[in-house]
Amino acid sequence: MPFSAMDNGAPDGLATGDFIIRPIRAADAELDYAAVMESRDFLRGWEQTGWPEEDFTVEANREDLEKMERWHANGDGFSYTVMNLVETECLGCVYLRSTNARTYAGARISPIGDFRWEDYEATVSFWVRRSRLETATDRALLDALRTWLAKDWSLQGHLFTTSELFVQQADMIGRTDLQLRFTVEKPNKPGRYLAYE
């Protein structure tokens, strides 16, 4: 479902002193694939599926990115790549989805306190490639996203989401001042998703 309440559409991206965030394109398939396969063990916990499979290919990744590019163009969801400053290495990805998106259909969403899921327009999720975790690029990306979302987006509320099975990221978010607002249990998923504000 499109982000109907946004005033000016999705921003084109963000440049910091450490990385560039811009819409992902099918042409990014090889760089993205390298980051995905390096990080596949924790991405399986993040996705709570077997993705990416051991035999995942660049071409299959390109097909995934083509879908993301279409969703982005249509305003159905926004997918960004995170690149180094010269765009020779993919450092991770960022995804914004409507809280009304199909991925949440049938989910059991439990508030922590007096919060209402419908008061938030988007969920934001992200990952950083494994080799960049030791330099705390994940925390730098989270900090940059918080500033960017507050300054350049016109969303009517947003939540940062992660999987409790992606322990490293859940622990990192737990060390910030973000507060857990909801747990999300999706059908046929082994763990909960955690949504923070």
Image (tube, rainbow, N blue to C red):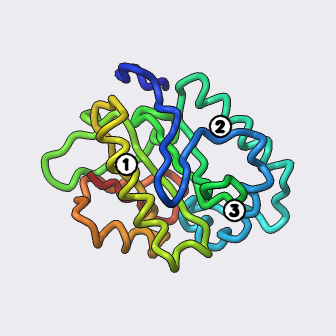
Contact between labelled residues 3 and 1, with CB atoms less than 8 Å apart: no
Question: Residue 103, relative to residue 145: is it above or below?
Answer: above
Question: Residue 113, relative to residue 101: is it above or below?
Answer: below
Q: How many marks?
A: 3
Residue at 52% x, 33% y is: 12
Residue toward you, 104 or 167: 167
Q: Which mark is residue 120?
A: none
The residue to which callout 3 is attached is 36
Q: Between disc 1 and disc 3, whose residue precedes?
A: 3
In 3D space, how far apart are the residues under numbered discs 2 and 3 (Cα atoms)?
15 Å
Percent x, y of residue 99? 39, 37
Query: Of the residues tagged 2 and 1, which is closer to the observer?
Result: 2
Instruction: Label 3: state its secondary structure.
Output: helix
Residue at 37% x, 71% y is: 172
Percent x, y of residue 49? 63, 61
Q: Between disc 2 and disc 1, whose residue precedes?
A: 2
Residue at 30% x, 55% y is: 196
